[in-house]
Image: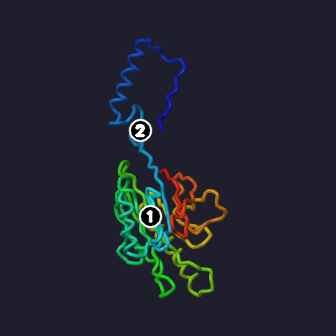
Amino acid sequence: MRQRTKRLAGAVAVPLAGVLTLSAVTADAVTANAAPGQEAGESSDTRAAVTMDVGTHNVLRGAAAFKPIGDVIGWQEMNDPADRKRLKNKLPRYNHFIPKKKPARAVPISWRQDKFTFVRGHAVLTHKGEAKVTPNRYVTWALLEHRKTDERLIVMNTHFISGAWSKHPDRQGRWLKHAKKLRTVIKNQHGKHPKLPIFLVGDFNRHKALKLPANVEYIRVKGAKGVPIDQSYATDTVRTSKVKRLKRFGSDHHAYRFTATF
């Protein structure tokens, strides 16, 4: 922040014409030192803010209609190759991170190709599956860069096992293991990129917000009582709206979206 200059009492008077001349020279100097496209007096360290919409949708094993609900979107239950092909066809203005590991392909991440470029991504196994119970579960993450500002961000997407507090003996243990692994993934990415905002969306299959490291905090849903199973999180340095519940678009889950600025 620019420091203010105080006028000292008893300062030597300067003729008015001299003041006007001096002011004009000073203004010219400030303008000359400004970066291209930068207003006079604006700090060269000032960066344009990124404002974007972040969406999430469990698409009922690919049965739902794929809608452009955000600039960045996390999908769940994209189980079949045909569903992922349809996603690409229905959203041609988006690029997608679809991991190589087959079960992880069910939780891809999409982004507007005119707004972001893909830097890298990965899928991290949270726990192994069991036949007729659950597939292997993953956390996927993508490091993206904003095309206009060069600001980077990390987007994560995941889908927890359902019925964790049912009578099945291993579901709760798997859910808790998934949560522990998710915290590790967030902690690791924050350690590598401490200044980057982290966004997390997914189907958590529990009506309770998680406590997460790196100041990644739950974002409340507008008009909702309690916490839905489809949840959104962001680093607390990010300014966000409340999450808006959208239509189901043919799924048994609502889609969700919030606006973020950083």
Q: Residue at x 61, y 56 (%)?
A: 222
- Could you say where residue 197 lies in the image, as x and y percent from the top left? 46, 57
Q: Nearer the viewer, residue 249 or 43?
A: 249
- Could you say where residue 74 lies in the image, as x and y percent from the top left? 46, 65
Q: Is residue 30 visible?
A: yes
Q: CA distance from mark 1 to mark 2?
A: 43 Å
Q: Where is mark 2, residue-wise?
A: 43
> Residue 217 falls in which quadrant of the image?
bottom right
Of badges 1 and 2, the one in the foreground is 1
113, above or below 16, in the image? below
Q: Nearer the viewer, residue 122 or 85?
A: 85
Q: Amino acid at mark 1?
A: Phe
Q: Amino acid at mark 2?
A: Ser
Q: Nearer the viewer, residue 180 or 162?
A: 162
Query: Label 1 crowding class (10 Å Cα cut-off): few <14, some 14-19, many 20+?
Result: some
Q: Residue at x 44, y 12 (%)?
A: 16
**Do tag 1 and tag 2 residues touch (Cβ < 8 Å)?**
no
- Could you say where residue 125 lies in the image, as x and y percent from the top left? 44, 77
Asked if residue 163 lies left or right of residue 32, the reply is right
Q: Residue at x 35, y 25 (%)?
A: 28
> Residue 36 falls in which quadrant of the image?
top left
- Could you say where residue 75 lies in the image, as x and y percent from the top left? 46, 67
Upstream in sequence: badge 1 or badge 2 = 2
Colour scheme shown: rainbow
Query: Label 2 crowding class (10 Å Cα cut-off): few <14, some 14-19, many 20+?
Result: few
- Secondary structure, mark 1, is loop
Q: Where is mark 1, residue-wise?
A: 66
72, above or below 170, in the image? above
> Residue 92 falls in which quadrant of the image?
bottom left
- Secondary structure, mark 2, is loop
Q: Residue at x 37, y 72 (%)?
A: 99
Q: Is residue 195 visible?
A: no
